[in-house]
Amino acid sequence: MSKFLFSIAFLFLTAAAWSQQSQEELEQKKAKLQEEIHEKEMMLQDVRKKEKSVVKLLAIQKDKIGLKEKLIHTTEKQTKLLSNDMYINQVEINHLKKELVDLKADYAEMIVKSYKSRSTQSRAMFLLSSENFLQAYKRLQYMKQYSSYRKMQGEEIKDKTQKLADHNAMLSGQKTEKQKLIVEQEKERKDLEQEKIEQEKIANSLKKDKKQIAAEIKKKQQETKKIDAQIQKLIRDAIAEANKKAAAAKAKANPKTTTVAETKAIETSTKIVLTPEGQLVSNSFKANKGRLPWPVEKGAISLGYGDQPHPVYKSLVIHNSGIEITTEAGANARAVFGGEVTKVIVISPLNKAVCIQHGDYFTVYQNLSTVNVSAGDKVSTKQVLGKVRTNAEGKTILKFMISQNTTYANPQTWLNR
């Protein structure tokens, strides 16, 4: 096989293998996006039925539109990838056709020559006219090789014809698949336009009563601040308790060299003074950033982290010190990493929170109806901490927070997606 033919074959096989893998990855991504869109749709239906406020409705609608746009982008990638496959396949078909034309022409010429010298007498005369035995032997071998070559040419034509048929069938299947993707993409675009119209309707309904919305946000933010203050105090108390133990351990281990000033500095520090063991836990937790499991088995983020402008009234700011994950009724909250329960807070009879320490990091699981752990318990990754509460509107939402000492971090960047 020539270098050109070898290069074409290698390119085709490599592209086919890469394409297959990429198509599978894109299909998995599409399935995940479709699952998230379905979850958003269920949340929308739930909000429409049970929640009078349209603020949440608009936020979910916005998330759903974002997911739809990602789905369309993924389908576009699939279509482009399929077009590339079809181009490579067409190149191979063109090459096979050219090879077949050359082979058939060569074979036809050989058949004509064979026909002209087909008589047994001609072959016998060709052998008998040899000058010596060695020449006669060589002529006999030539005749055998010629016959074998002719047979081989026939087999090669048959093989190339089959390959051409296979590639044509593959190309036909790819064209069908591409058409299917184009139809699917067009449907998704129409759905997206409908979702945007729906979003516009919701936004217009919001604009009719700005004062009511502002009052609603303010009330919710006040409640959130009170709970955040409780959790902050809890974390400060945990830091103080940990540093008190660290100071006592240091004084006991080095009674002659540890000064009163050193002990006081450890006890009054606003950050946890880590022991060697605590430092290992902290480093391990930090090393798993972006790979922590979700604090619930199923769910979608319904409110992100930090200060966020209201989707309609940009002057109104919504603050969230963690993330809110909407999940299914009866869902369990679970630890995202191994650690020690520092406190179980009873915010109200129906709203409890669990705080777990991981070195100088803390994770907080809020809005639990029941709790399975107690302060001082050692917990492992994915261990069930309690049931997530379903509120009066029928929504089951877990608020999840991460902080290093008293500084909050965006939990979304820590969780595995």
Image: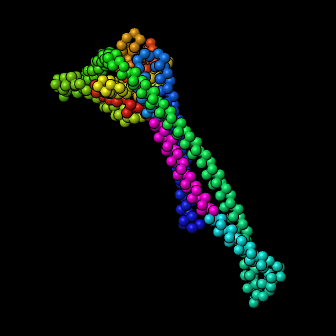
Q: Is the magenta stretch mostly helix, strand or loop?
A: helix
278 relative position to 183: left or right: left
Side (left or right) of 218 relative to 336: left
| The C terminus sits in image quarter | top left
Q: Does the magenta stretch include residue 193?
A: no
Residue 301's spot in the image, x, y percent? 42, 27
- Residue 215 seen in the current view: yes
Tell me which residue sits at (55%, 61%) in the image.
Answer: 8
Residue at (40% x, 17% y) in the render:
53
Q: Which of 303 and 17 is in front in this view?
A: 303
Q: In this view, does 95 lie above or below 113?
A: above
Q: In this view, does 381 lie above or below 51?
A: below
Foreground: 274 or 84?
A: 84
**Residue at figure coordinates x 47%, y 19% from the top left:** 48
Q: Over which residues does the magenta segment extend?
A: 69-97
Relative image position of residue 169 (x, y in whole percent): 65, 51
The residue lying toward the viewer, choosing from 75 and 157, is: 75
- Name of the residue lying farthest toward the bottom: 131
In the rendering, at what x and y percent does residue 3 appear? 54, 66
The residue depicted at 71 percent of the width and 74 percent of the height is 109
Q: Can residue 335 be seen in this view?
A: no
x, y (%) of residue 123?
Answer: 79, 81
**The quadrant where residue 167 appears:** bottom right
Q: How is the image coloured?
A: rainbow
153 shown above or below 371: below
The quadrant where residue 359 appears: top left
Q: In terms of image quadrants, where is residue 138?
A: bottom right
Horizontal relation, residue 132 to residue 222: left or right: right
Count of marks overlaid on the render: 0
